[in-house]
Image (cartoon, rainbow, N blue to C red):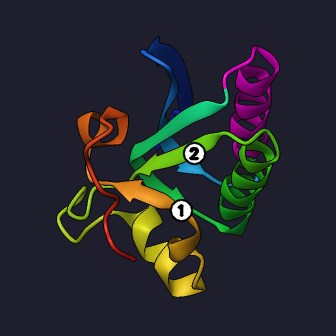
Amino acid sequence: MVVTFKVTGGEQGEWAVLQVSGELDLVTSPVLRQRVHDAVAEGHHCLVLDLSEVFFCDSSGVGVLIAARRLIRSCQGRLRLVLPARGAADGSHVNRVLGALGVRRLFDVYGDLDAALGDEGEPLSA
């Protein structure tokens, strides 16, 4: 079975949006890290990472998310994650991994892209 990892980007208002799909692991996490750095280098300090199509995340993927948070905060920017509570039949894998590691509370997490892009929506609780 061949798993395709893909990061696509775009802009929606003041937000740069990176939509990630596939497995976020040791092999693929450098791609996401570079895309985040590229977005910041282009002047985007408000970033949404849509991880709703990521079905596996290991510690290197978590490391990229934490590094992205640190980078965005150093620019006085905002980082939001899209992690649907029920992305798969038993919930979002990334959401469960972040919760198990105790780092979920570090992120502003939204259930869908529309909520993440809106100013009136509150993040989901940790």
- Position of 25 relative to 105 (above/below): above
Tally of numbered discs: 2
Position of 51 with respect to 112 (left or right) is: right
Position of residue 110 measured from the top left corner of the image (x, y, whole percent): 33, 53
Q: Secondary structure at mark 2?
A: strand
Q: For the residue marked with disc 1, what is the amino acid?
A: Phe
According to the image, label 1 marks what residue?
107
- Residue under the image location 71 percent in, 27 percent down: 35
Answer above or below: position of 15 versus 63: above
Seen in the picture, residue 48 relative to 14 is either above or below; the reply is: below
Q: Is residue 2 visible?
A: no
Using a 10 Å C-alpha cutoff, classify the residue at mark 1 as few (fewer than 14 neighbours), some (14 to 19) or many (20 or more). some
Numbered label attached to residue 81: none
Q: Which residue: 80% across, 45% down?
A: 71
Q: Magenta segment, which residues?
A: 28-44
Residue 3 falls within the magenta-colored stretch: no
**Circles 2 and 1 in contact, beta carbons < 8 Å:** yes
Label 1: element kind: loop
Question: What residue sits right under mark 2 in the picture?
Answer: 79
Check if residue 42 falls in the magenta segment.
yes
Residue 124 in percent (x, y) is at 31, 65
Residue 96: % across, % down: 42, 75
Residue density around tag 2, few if under 14, some if 14–19, many if 20 or more, within 10 Å? many
At 26% from the left and 48% from the top, the residue drawn is 121
> Mark 2 or mark 1, which has the lower sequence index?
2
Residue drawn where x is 35% and y is 33% of the image: 117
- Is residue 71 in sight in this rendering? yes
